[in-house]
Amino acid sequence: MTGKGFRQRSVLAATLGGVILIAASAAAQTAPAPTFSKDVAPILQNKCQECHQPNSIAPMSLITFAESRPWARSIKTRVATRQMPPWHIDQSVGVQKFKNDMSLTQKEIDTIVAWVDAGAPQGDAKDMPAPKPIASDNSWKGVRDGFGEPDLVIRSSEYKMPAKGQDVWYRPMSEIPITEPRWVKMVEIRPTNLKARKVLHHSIAYQVLSPANVASVNTGTANGPSAAATVEDLVNRRPQLMEWAIGKGYDLFTPGTGKMIMPGEKLSWDQHLHAAGEEIDAGSEIALWLYPKGQEPTKRSYLIGFTGLQRRGFLDIAPNSVSHTEGFTVLKENTLITNFQPHFHLRGKAMEVRAILPDGSTEVVSYVGKFNFNWMTNYIYADDAAPAFPKGTIIQVSAWYDNTKANPNNPDPDQWVGYGDRTVDEMAHAWMNVVYLSDAEYKAHVDAKKARQTNESPRQ
Ligand code: HEC
């Protein structure tokens, strides 16, 4: 009879449930709770202290037990929701291998949560790992990460930002002090001093090209791509050496690619300053790590802001609404994409970059579902994960805005928001460094990817 069968199954299920419950509580009794000294401190050292130390950007230090203990609850919330570390890229779609991944593994999250749930015990101080060296000031992340001292540091003049007032866009010029053409391998921008970190929201270093440099790219010599893409990228849009914003580290170009600088060229800065309640002198400086002479790369890398807007410079976000825009850019060349940095202002909520290939297939390149204005995180793809698309592919950038009070960064959900440079205005684009590939290079990329996939998934 069906009734009986049903009863039997539920008894069995209940019994199984009981067994699992007993096993779980037995495990909880025997497995010791994680302690700060043994289990949590190593995670904080590797994934948190770069920012959570006295002279860095985070509001509190997480080095000792005494410093960390008062924050236990907040730490649990921030790590369990993956707000901290600030690595907000979706882990279920798109490229998943990065050069600068600072996210926690699920196991690390579980350890921290279990530690807090157990009352955040210190454990035996003897278990503490040896302390990690901490930065004493405004040091370069590239140096801390072992790339050595930069070859060249170019500094902008400083602006005296008053304690109160409107936002300022400070746009001085700097010389590039070199005597022969050089190739740049890595760049990093930082505020000129520790206090400047409080007022400098973003800084872009544009390269004012010498005519010789434009010509060398334009004619396709010096390893430039074809003229069509180049003239537009280099002249009309001003090439950028780097875009920096709060929380960003360096841009490391893909091996064999870089940006060329020439004698006589200048840097033109675009720095966005925001008053912070005290007078602060602020500017920015850029560090350049160069390719050694004789090891010049064969390709240029271009920083492009793929638009998320239907019409450039036009946005219309109603008060108290969640809204969406999308922008389309056709690739004129076979293109390798080496990083993704979503850019919005305060209402930014989510951004997806999708490729629509000439054969009609589509592919999600990257998706950030929890954008947070405080974190202009740059996601740098691992060399063997950077995607390439053929000429004619459409890059579709979809952008979502949250102009409701649910958005903690929203200064006023009752405001209409349009396009503009001010932080209270909005914009949406995907900063991506790209390298243009010849047909042969593109084919080699596709073949290498196929070979990797065969090796990685033998069952298919
Ligand atoms: C790249 C720098 C950086 C890293 C790495 C980082 N943090 Fe943070 N953290 C910050 C900054 C800046 C803030 C303040 C702004 C904010 O809340 O986003 C912050 C805020 C926090 C807060 C909220 C403090 C409060 O006011 O309640 C907690 C908790 C926290 N971080 C924990 C961690 C933990 C734990 C890790 C490592 C697992 C970590 N953070 C990694 C920079 C960082």
Image: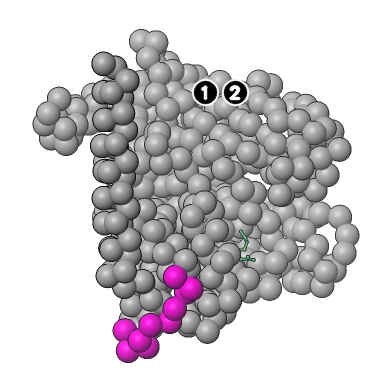
Mark 1, other Cα within 10 Å: few <14 / some 14–19 / many ≥20: many
- Distance of label 2 from label 1 (alpha carbons): 6 Å
Q: Position of residue 236 (x, y in %)?
A: 62, 32
Residue 286 lies in what quarter of the image?
Answer: bottom right
Q: Which mark is residue 19?
A: none
Q: Residue at point 24% right, 26% down?
A: 446
Which residue, given by chain and number where applicable, does mark 1 sit on?
Answer: 396
Residue 2 lies in what quarter of the image?
Answer: top left
With 86 as the anchor, is 149 left or right in this view?
left
Farthest bottom residue? 126
Mark 2, other Cα within 10 Å: few <14 / some 14–19 / many ≥20: many
- Asked if the magenta segment contains residue 125, the reply would be yes
Q: Which residues are magenta?
A: 118-127
295 relative to 63, above or below: above
Q: Position of residue 9 (x, y in %)?
A: 27, 30
Which residue, given by chain and number where applicable, does mark 2 sit on?
Answer: 327
Q: Is mark 2 within 8 Å of ligand 1?
A: no
According to the image, what is the colour scheme of the structure? one colour
Mark 2 in CB contact with mark 1 (< 8 angstroms): yes
Q: Secondary structure at mark 1?
A: strand
- Res 1 seen here: yes
Quadrant of ligand 1: it is bottom right
User: Depth check: 173 or 410 in front?
Assistant: 410
User: Depth check: 196 or 116 in front?
Assistant: 116
- Asked if the magenta segment contains residue 383, the reply would be no
User: Depth check: 79 or 48 in front?
Assistant: 79
Q: Is mark 1 within 8 Å of ligand 1?
A: no
